[in-house]
Image (cartoon, helix red, strand yellow):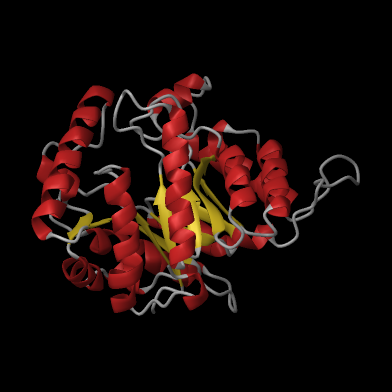
Amino acid sequence: MTPQRLGFFTRLVRTDPAETAATVYREALEQIDLAERLGYQTAWVAQHHLDPAEGGLPSPFVFLAHAAARFSRIRFGTAIVTLALEDPIRVAEDAAVLDELSGGRLELGFGAGGSRHAFELFELGDADRQRVYADKLAKVTGALGGEPLVGDRSLNPPAPGLRDRLWQATFSAGGAERAGRAGDGLLLSKAQPRDPAAPGATLWEIQQPLVDAYLDALPSGTAPRIGASRGVFVADDHDEAVELAERGAARFLDQLGRNGGPEGTNTVAEVLRDLYFGTPDEVAEQLAADSALRHATDFIVQAHPVDPGHAAVSRSIELIATKVAPQLGWRSDERNQL
């Protein structure tokens, strides 16, 4: 399957302590502007709390409402809203307002995960994350589907169609099966926890069972929606790509050391093992081997975790759209190209 849509993902990461949030937000908007003009179909953001090196956006609906007022064509996605930390009815209300303002351009992604300090911030450090997530997902899904909330009163404003644009992110086959049974989209991460018994497994080898579980669980007649997020950094020159990727990986590794990170990520090479980087031809060849990507309806690229700076990310966005994605079979709307 050739990905039907090309997406750009930004975590709005602050790589320089001297940068202000205003600078990070402005640069992210400039990157979304460039992506829209190059024919990308979707711009995705993540929700993070407290740590600007992990991600700089605690309020994705506020940011995306601003973006929706500036850009008229590109769709907007949350990957993810950490639903366990939110009031599900307020999430449904905010999502409904954003979808109305944007003309039905919202793709609404949820997940159970989040950093330990974020759960402690909301006094949920000891919570059963999966149970809390499942309970809140049922409430927000019902609200978006028009179920009565109090008496005979339902969500206001209503969100026609948004229920069919829900996505679930997961690291497990069980989570993928849950998304499939619900008819939701499946969001695959740019990195995946590894089985200590198979430390050399590729990203797509780890994620293929999730794809299979999702497809098997989909109700008959329901079209699959699989969003494969991938860390991708493309430069004009091979040596430049390697230098910037390794520099960013070293910085990210230092951040993991300060804040705690996944086991098995102790070297620059381990940070880079799931990242596709190099020249356009090199990256296209790397991506062509990704079997999970072959099932994707949405190919979503992000420069994290190397985050090489605004200029380099912008050039990568351009090279992906003009040199890499076409080799994978993607074609943009020619009216929107630079």
Query: Where is residue 337 shown, x and y percent of the image?
Result: 44, 70
Residue 145, image x, y percentages = 74, 56
- In this rendered view, identify the residue nearer to me: 215 or 293: 293
User: Which quadrant does the N terminus fall into?
Assistant: bottom left
Residue 50: quarter of image: top left
Farthest front residue in view = 338
- Of 299 and 263, nearer the camera is 299
Q: Which residue is at a point 31% across and 24% down the rendered structure image?
A: 17
Q: Position of residue 188 (x, y in %)?
A: 39, 57
Vertical position of residue 158 compared to residue 332: above or below? above
In this rendering, would 53 be left or right of 151? left
Rendered view: 178 above or below 193: below
Q: Note whether residue 303 is visible.
A: no
Query: Which residue is at the far right?
Result: 152
Q: Residue at x 58, y 72 (%)?
A: 219
Residue 248 figure quarter: top left
Q: Nearer the viewer, residue 116 or 284?
A: 284
The residue closer to the viewer here, 45 or 114, is 45
Looking at the image, residue 51 sits to the left or right of residue 164; the answer is: left
Q: Is residue 3 visible?
A: yes
Quarter the C terminus occupies: bottom left
Q: Residue at x 24, y 63 (%)?
A: 205
Q: Is residue 138 left or right of residue 48?
A: right
Residue at 26%, 27% (x, y): give it. 260
In the rendered view, would you say 95 is above or below 252?
below
Image-based side of 91 in relation to 293, left or right: right
Q: Quadrant of residue 163?
A: bottom right
Q: Can you give x and y, in whole percent of width and height, for residue 59 in the image?
A: 56, 34
